[in-house]
Image (spheres, helix red, strand yellow):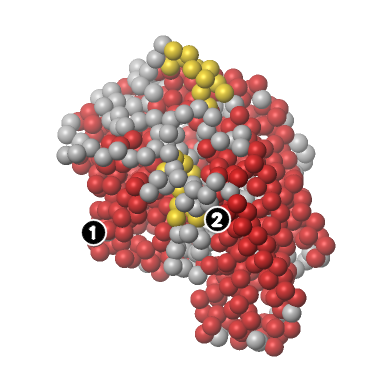
């Protein structure tokens, strides 16, 4: 078979030509300004419109809001990509500020709209929602009405919105810039190299323990050196959130994250309760893996290491070929999308220093494209990271034909398509495995994901809960942050992880994403939800993709409980749903223990 060569560097010029000096992008910002100005004009007369039931004007307003959101996402995605490929791009940083101002202005107008909706008489509101023209927007309009800031004045809303740009969100941007600027000296294969944080983190799966340990210690050392600075950042982000919560009369730190994820607290509590009762087998897996590596306990820096000799190195072209050959198992559209991403330069995978450390997928909804960013170094983990981000891209693709305001799906669902894509490739690798050693290797990779979702993510959740409670009383010191992190890890892992990184609160970027508090439990939800979807896919085969696309397209206009009930017929507030997913993962543990020496 002829070998295919795929580009490792993305093409952003197809979106906006000229990078951070793009005149085309400046035109996009001008267009965004015009759309916002038009929305402002519509809102000025909106108070009387809602009362006189002039539905066509409401439809126009909803359309304007959706269009503005698409243009803001397009702009933010472009800037995110520019700064990921070159964190020192000052022109891109300047553009980020311009877009942030537009976004802040838009959010103020949207808050006004929500406030008007919340003040509408209940009988008038019911009549409005029953009209055919608003049928597709019923869920979002109700959500706006319920989440309105009706207790705050227009001046207060405006002040909060302004503070978020130069205060709150600025701290999140500062964190990303700070991490991207760090260079770490590590000896790899007998040669000392200057590595980015992303490259250093990638060494956690290096075949040599000496290299893994050195990378772990080097990272811990740099975090210790800068702990005061990072502690200021996380304290300021949390402090701002808490002040806003106080202003709104919110005492439960989970209230906003649950609203953003369109999830009941009952669902979240049930999920964690079931997971907590099923952790013992995963502790046994960690024990066995440690024994195979000659240790009595699983060292944190060995967790990502290959449990057998790594024969699964794949260069980028081999990985792209393998993914495209197997990803279409349940339908042609996912396969076509992935091929387009590889062939049309949508992926930035080059292994080089001075890149951002965080893999991601950026959506460009105006042009109907996505871009995937990562540092590909040839490991099986990299293959799964690549297909994970492509899964996000397919979710974006599925939403192309969905109305503007219904495109925005919650984070809890955002991790579903990505995890589903991973499972396809893990299973394809398992089927391809010819030896016992290969099967053990792949099972280990699969179980790492279970441990990450059931133990690591749980530790993040516990830490964030405890940190926010303590932050209500004032600044939390680096020493105390380390203690909270260590306690949370030990509890979540059942003390089955040795020498954990007490600086996980520093290098886990999710704590610093200002748009999304508690960006931890959505991963675990998405993982188990994807397991349920994958089980259905294996029953239906190629026919499944049609139903899968319907589920993804509904993800922006339903709460998660209703979405799962509609498409899977399952009640996710019940233990049975979560137990079924856990049982699938327990079978992986059993197989691993059977195949490995005790």
The location of residue 275, given as percent across then percent down, is 45, 46
In this rendering, would 564 be left or right of 442?
right
Give the residue drawn at x 30%, y 29%.
Answer: 313
C-alpha distance separating marks 1 and 2: 34 Å
Q: Quadrant of the C terminus?
A: top left
User: In the picture, which quadrant includes the N terminus?
Assistant: top left
Please tell me how crowded label 1 is: few (under 14), some (14-19), or many (20+) other residues with Cα within 10 Å: few
Q: Is residue 415 visible?
A: no
Given residues 305 and 57, the one toward you in this image is 57
Could you classify mark 2 by the number of other residues whose Cα lies within 10 Å: few (under 14), some (14-19), or many (20 or more)? Answer: many
Badge 1 element: helix
- Decide which of tag 1 and tag 2 comes sooner along the chain: 2
Among the 4 quarters of the image, the one containing residue 547: bottom left
Q: Which quadrant of the view contains residue 39?
A: bottom right
Q: Secondary structure at mark 2?
A: helix
| Nearest-to-viewer mark from 1 and 2 | 2
**Mark identifier at residue 19:** none
Coordinates of residue 488 in the picture (x, y in percent): 57, 35
Residue 441, can we see it?
Answer: yes
Q: Report the side of 437 relative to 61 (left or right).
A: left
The vertical placement of 565 against 297, above or below, is: below
Q: Residue drawn 59% across and 26% down?
A: 182
Residue 134 position, x and y percent, is 55, 80
Q: Residue at x 64, y 81 (%)?
A: 57
Circle 1 sits on which residue? 541
Above or below, 352 against 538 in this view is above
**Placement of 553 over or under 425, stated as above or below:** below
Spot occupied by residue 472 in the image (x, y as percentages of width and height): 75, 44
Q: Residue at x 49, y 17 (%)?
A: 193
Q: Is residue 359 left or right of 120 when viewed as pictured?
A: left
User: Which residue is tagged 2?
Assistant: 74
């Amino acid at each position: 078979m002829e070998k295919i060569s795929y580009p490792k560097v993305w093409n952003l010029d197809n979106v906006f030509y000229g990078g951070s000096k793009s005149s085309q992008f400046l035109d996009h910002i001008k267009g965004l300004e015009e759309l916002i100005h038009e929305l402002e004009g519509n809102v000025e007369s909106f108070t009387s419109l809602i009362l006189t039931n002039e539905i066509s004007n409401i439809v126009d307003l909803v359309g304007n809001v959706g269009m503005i959101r698409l243009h803001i996402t397009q702009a933010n995605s472009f800037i995110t990509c520019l700064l990921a490929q070159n964190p020192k791009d000052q022109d891109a940083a300047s553009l980020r500020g311009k877009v942030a101002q537009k976004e802040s202005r838009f959010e103020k107008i949207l808050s006004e709209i929500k406030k008007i909706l919340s003040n509408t008489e209940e009988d008038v509101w019911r009549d409005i929602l029953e009209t055919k023209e608003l049928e597709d927007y019923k869920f979002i309009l109700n959500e706006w009405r319920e989440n309105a800031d009706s207790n705050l004045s227009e001046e207060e809303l405006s002040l909060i919105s302004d503070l978020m740009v130069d205060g709150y969100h600025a701290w999140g941007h500062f964190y990303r810039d700070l991490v991207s600027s760090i260079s770490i000296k590590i000896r790899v294969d007998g040669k000392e190299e200057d590595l980015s944080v992303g490259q250093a983190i990638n060494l956690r799966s290096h075949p040599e323990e000496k290299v893994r340990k050195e990378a772990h210690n080097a990272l811990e050392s740099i975090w210790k050196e800068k702990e005061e600075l990072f502690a200021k950042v996380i304290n300021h982000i949390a402090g701002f959130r808490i002040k806003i919560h106080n202003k709104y009369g919110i005492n439960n730190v989970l209230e906003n994250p649950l609203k953003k994820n369109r999830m009941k607290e009952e669902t979240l509590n049930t999920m964690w309760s079931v997971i907590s009762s099923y952790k013992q087998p995963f502790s046994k897996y960690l024990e066995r893996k440690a024994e195979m590596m000659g240790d009595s306990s699983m060292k944190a820096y060995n967790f990502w290491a290959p449990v057998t000799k790594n024969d699964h190195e794949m260069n980028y072209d081999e990985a792209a070929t393998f993914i495209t050959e197997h990803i279409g198992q349940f339908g042609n559209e996912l396969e076509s999308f992935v091929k387009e991403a590889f062939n049309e330069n949508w992926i930035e995978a080059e292994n080089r220093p001075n890149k951002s450390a965080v893999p991601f997928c950026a959506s460009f909804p105006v042009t109907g494209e996505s871009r995937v960013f990562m540092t590909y170094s040839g490991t099986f983990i990299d293959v799964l990271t690549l297909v994970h981000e492509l899964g996000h891209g397919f979710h974006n693709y599925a939403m192309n034909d969905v109305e503007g305001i219904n495109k925005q799906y919650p984070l809890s669902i955002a991790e579903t398509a990505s995890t589903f894509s991973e499972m396809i490739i893990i299973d394809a690798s398992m089927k391809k495995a010819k030896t016992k050693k290969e099967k053990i290797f792949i099972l280990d990779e699969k179980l790492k994901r279970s441990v990450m979702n059931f133990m690591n993510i749980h530790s993040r959740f516990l830490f964030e809960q405890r940190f926010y409670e303590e932050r209500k009383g004032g600044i939390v010191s680096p020493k105390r942050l380390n203690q909270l992190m260590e306690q949370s890890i030990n509890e979540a892992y059942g003390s089955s992880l040795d020498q954990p990184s007490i600086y996980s609160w520093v290098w886990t970027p999710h704590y610093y994403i200002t748009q999304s508090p508690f960006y931890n439990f959505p991963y675990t939800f998405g993982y188990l939800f994807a397991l349920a979807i994958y089980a259905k896919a294996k029953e239906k085969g190629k026919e499944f993709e049609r139903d899968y696309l319907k589920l993804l397209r509904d993800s922006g206009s339903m709460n998660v409980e209703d979405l799962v009930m509609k498409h899977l017929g399952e009640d996710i507030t019940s233990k049975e749903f979560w137990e079924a997913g856990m049982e699938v993962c327990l079978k992986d543990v059993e197989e691993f223990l059977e195949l490995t020496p005790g």
